Image (cartoon, rainbow, N blue to C red):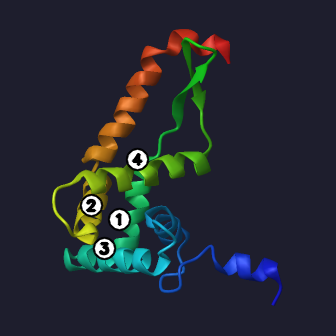
Amino acid sequence: MSCQGAAKNEKYDPVYHNRSVNILVNHIMKGGKKSLAYKIIYRTVKKIQQKKKNPLAVLRQAIHRVTPHIAVKTSGSTHRVPVEIGSTQGKAFAVRWLLGASRKRPGRDMALKLSSELVDAAKGKGDAMRKKEETHRRVEANMAFAHFR
């Protein structure tokens, strides 16, 4: 098998063959412990299933709702310029915010915290949604500098 084929297989997780799950695993992973990250994700999926919901649909909807389409970028020393961001970078922001918000939740079980944050984000609530709204407010406040692009 060529290296290209091996890289292609790593874009999808082994159980659900879903890219979003694999992206989440790669962001959750700390210190190269990918098997632990997979265990956390699969326990999260089971917890969402216990709430009688489709876990992949909840994950897709949560990432879609939290993904920002515009952000501020520092230009020079003082100006924050609003810029549109691509879908890949937006999804990276969304995943980072979802994981950060779930890590801040009280408790020890990361699977429970992540499942609760994903369900909340899919409903349009939660700390990750607050972070997206805060980013959009920051963009609105800095629209005067949009001509600096």
Residue on which disc 4 sits = 66
- Residue drawn at x 22%, y 76% as measured from the top left: 52
Q: CA distance from mark 4 to mark 1?
A: 12 Å
- Residue drawn at x 35%, y 51% as measured from the top left: 100
Q: Is residue 82 above or below residue 105?
A: above
**Rendering coords of residue 135 (x, y %):** 42, 31
43 displayed left or right of 76: left
Which tag, 2 or 3, sits closer to the chain's start? Answer: 3
Tell me the number on the disc at residue 44: 3
Residue on which disc 2 sits = 119
Q: CA distance from mark 3 to mark 1?
A: 11 Å
Tag 1: residue type? Val
Which tag, 2 or 1, sits closer to the chain's start? Answer: 1
Tag 4: residue type? Val
Q: CA distance from mark 4 to mark 3?
A: 18 Å
Residue on which disc 1 sits = 58
Q: Secondary structure at mark 2?
A: helix
Q: Of residues 30 and 21, which is closer to you in this image?
A: 30
Tag 2: residue type? Val
**Rendering coords of residue 4 (x, y %):** 80, 77
Which tag, 4 or 3, sits closer to the chain's start? Answer: 3
